[in-house]
Amino acid sequence: MLNSGVTLGIGSGGSASADHQNMFEAMRMASFLSRLDDPDPETWLGTWDILRAGTLGGTSALGLAGMVGRLAPGYKADVVFVDLTNINFVPLNNIANQIVNCEDSSAVDSVMIGGRMVLEGRRFVSLDFDKLRHDVQATVERLQEQNQPSKERMEAMAKFVSSHCVGFSCEGYHVHRSLDR
C-alpha cells in the first residue's frame, strides 16, 4: 500500500473489537503483521513507517489531516508525554524503535488533548476515575445479566466456529502487501 501511495493508518478499535485501547500495542501488532507476507526484511514496514501510520496516517484516515497528528503550528496539541527513565527507554537508542517495539503504555506520564492536560503525573486531572470505573463496572454487570441468553447461544456455537477457524488457518495465506504481484 505504501509503495502505491496509499495512506496507511493504524488505530485501536476499542475494547469491543480488540480487548484493549492501547495504540502502542496496535502499532507493535502492525509491525509484526507486515512480516507475514514476505520473509525479506527489506519489504517489512520500518518503525518510522509504523509510527507515521499511528499518528499522521490514522488522523488522515479519520479525516482529521491538518488538524492533529503532529506537533506544529495550527495543529491541536494532542501530546503523549513518556517518562524516558522508564525501562522501555533505558538506554535511549532509537526512539521510533523503542516506541513501536518496547512501549506498553507503562511509560506514559501525562497526556494533553487539544492543549489541555487530561492526565498529569499518571493522574486524571478533569474526571473522577474511581467513580467512572465504578459506573462502568455497574453497567457491565447489568449488560452481562441482560445478555446472558445470547452469550449462552454464542458459547454453544463456539466449537463450530473454532473448527472453521482451524480449517481456514491451514490454507495458504493469500493476501499480499505489494500491489504489483
Image (spheres, rainbow, N blue to C red):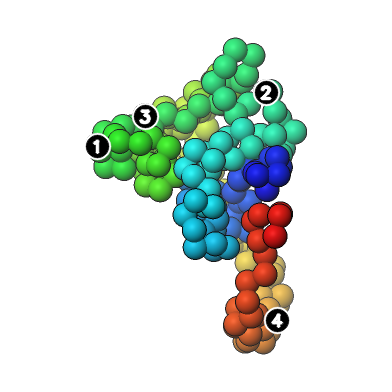
Q: Indicate the quadrant where residue 93 lies.
A: top left
Question: Residue 81 location in percent, x, y?
Answer: 42, 29
* Residue 138 in view (yes/no): no
Mark 3 and mark 2: Cα distance apart in space? 26 Å
Q: Nearer the viewer, mark 4 or mark 1?
A: 1
For image coordinates 71% across by 30% down, the residue present is: 64
For the point 67% across and 23% down, the residue is 67
The three-letter amino acid code for the residue at tag 3 is Gly
Nearer the viewer's eye, disc 1 or disc 3? 1
- The residue under label 3 is 121
Mark 4–mark 2 distance (CA, rounded to whole Å) = 45 Å
Image quarter (top left, top right, bottom left or bottom right) of the C terminus: bottom right
Q: For mark 2, does the 10 Å Cα neighbourhood hold few (<14), some (14 to 19), or many (20 or more) residues?
A: some
- Whichever of callouts 4 and 2 sits on the residue coming sooner in the sequence is 2
Assign a secondary structure to mark 3.
loop
Three-letter residue code for mark 1: Pro
Q: Distance between the residues labelled 4 and 3?
A: 45 Å
Mark 1 touches mark 3? (CB < 8 Å): no
Q: Which of marks 4 and 2 is in front?
A: 2
Q: Looking at the image, which residue is at 56% across and 36% down?
A: 52
Mark 4 and mark 1: Cα distance apart in space = 51 Å
- Return the residue at label 2: 67
| Residue projecting furthest to the right | 63
Dot 1: element:
loop
Q: Do callouts 4 and 2 mark residues in contact (Cβ within 8 Å)?
A: no
Q: Can residue 159 be seen in this view?
A: yes
Q: Which residue is under mark 1?
A: 91
**Residue, x 47% and y 54% (percent of image)?**
41
Q: How far apart are marks 1 and 3 (CA)?
A: 22 Å
Name the residue carrying label 4. 153
Q: Is residue 26 left or right of residue 84?
A: right
